[in-house]
Image (spheres, helix red, strand yellow):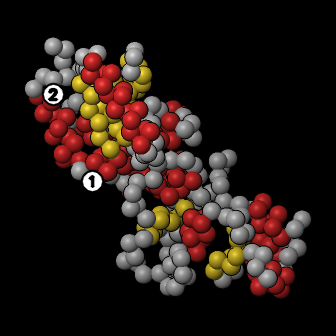
């Protein structure tokens, strides 16, 4: 088996010890590195050239992807500005910067170190990434409830986790019951999940992913007629999409609905304005049939 195949079989990252016991000694590995065939991450650790950069960065720090960074590897939503979350064994020393390999400074905002160390492997283990259940347990303990909710919903939506995983998390992290009880698999984006969770804390009830004849599927309906659409960063860019959304809103208005639309940046950076707008319409009774 070639050096590339061995490293690939180990998840794209391997220690010199792992390579030695598989027949490739330090001199051979060093030559492969000097010839540009593999990447040296840090002393004693190597990677194939096509490995996910986040795995390389976590290994360079000296640990394993965890929390939101690990969940992103399973297709979960990644909150903006979250940094790189790395789990290292308790008491680890000689941590390195994820990019340049310089000594790690604990105040580095780019990296969030979890001092709980990688856990044992299970059937879902991906080398360099914490098993998904364990990563989610970290999310529920590390992140704000609305962020954790959005991550959980994104993984339910893409099928990476099931109801059994949510039940396991409810038992493992009792303080997260509210987050987990509200979570479902209908959210189309992280910003939609943030909106639903935050509005639920304000006591606003809504229906999610509602099909309206003549309009199509809408993100939320509050009361009888207030439609709220959340334009995610990923799916609503471009002039064509904008025109389509305006046409849908016009049809909805003609049918007696009140369409309201917010974009990703408003949900993330201007939440108070979003919440006050929705609550003002509800207070006036605009969500009810005339």
Circles 2 and 1: CB atoms closer than 8 Å:
no
The image quadrant where one finds the N terminus is bottom right
Q: Which mark is residue 82?
A: none
Dot 1: element: helix
Residue 10 drawn at (x, y percent): 74, 62
Q: Earlier in the sequence, mark 2 or mark 1?
A: 1
Mark-to-mark CA distance, 2 and 1: 22 Å
Residue name at image x 47 percent, y 63 percent? 85
Dot 2: element: helix
Residue 280 drawn at (x, y percent): 12, 33
The image quadrant where one finds the C terminus is top left
Residue name at image x 38 percent, y 62 percent? 81
* Depicted 242 relative to depicted 59: above or below: above
* Residue farthest left in this picture: 284
* Residue 26 visible in the displayed image: no
Residue 229 sits in which quadrant?
Answer: top left
Label 1 crowd (10 A; few <14 / some 14-19 / many >=20)? few
Question: Which residue is label 2 attached to?
Answer: 282
Label 2 crowd (10 A; few <14 / some 14-19 / many >=20)? some
Residue name at image x 66 percent, y 59 percent? 127
Q: Which mark is residue 269?
A: 1
Residue 187 drawn at (x, y percent): 43, 35
Picture mark count: 2
Residue 234 drawn at (x, y percent): 46, 46
Q: Nearer the viewer, residue 217 or 160?
A: 217
Q: Nearer the viewer, residue 271 or 247?
A: 247
* Depicted 212 relative to depicted 247: above or below: above
* Residue 13 visible in the displayed image: yes
Q: Is residue 94 left or right of residue 281?
A: right
Residue name at image x 56 percent, y 68 percent? 58
Q: Is residue 222 left or right of residue 152?
A: left
């Amino acid at each position: 088996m070639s050096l590339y195949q061995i490293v690939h079989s180990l998840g794209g990252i391997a220690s010199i010890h792992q390579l030695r016991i598989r027949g490739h000694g330090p001199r051979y590995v060093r030559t492969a590195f000097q010839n540009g065939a593999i990447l040296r991450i840090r002393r004693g650790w190597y990677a194939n050239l096509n490995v996910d950069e986040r795995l390389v960065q976590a290994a360079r720090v000296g640990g394993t992807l965890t929390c939101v960074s690990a969940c992103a590897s399973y297709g979960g939503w990644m909150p903006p500005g979250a940094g790189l979350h790395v789990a290292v064994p308790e008491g680890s020393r000689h941590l390195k910067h994820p990019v340049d390999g310089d000594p790690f400074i604990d105040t580095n905002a780019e990296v969030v170190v979890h001092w709980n160390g990688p856990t044992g492997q299970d059937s879902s283990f991906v080398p360099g990434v914490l098993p998904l259940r364990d990563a989610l347990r970290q999310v529920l303990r590390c992140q704000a409830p609305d962020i954790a909710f959005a991550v959980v919903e994104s993984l339910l939506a893409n099928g990476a986790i099931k109801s059994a995983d949510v039940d396991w998390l409810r038992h493992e992290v009792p303080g997260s019951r509210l987050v987990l009880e509200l979570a479902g698999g209908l959210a189309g984006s992280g910003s939609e999940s943030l909106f639903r969770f935050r509005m639920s804390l304000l006591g606003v009830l809504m229906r999610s992913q509602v099909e309206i004849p003549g309009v199509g599927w809408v993100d939320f309906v509050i009361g009888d007629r207030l439609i709220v659409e959340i334009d995610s960063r990923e799916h609503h860019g471009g002039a064509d999409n904008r025109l389509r959304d305006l046409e849908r809103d016009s049809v909805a208005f003609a049918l007696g609905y009140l369409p309201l639309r917010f974009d990703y940046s408003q949900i993330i950076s201007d939440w108070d304005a979003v919440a006050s707008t929705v609550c003002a319409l509800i207070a006036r009774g605009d969500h009810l049939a005339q």
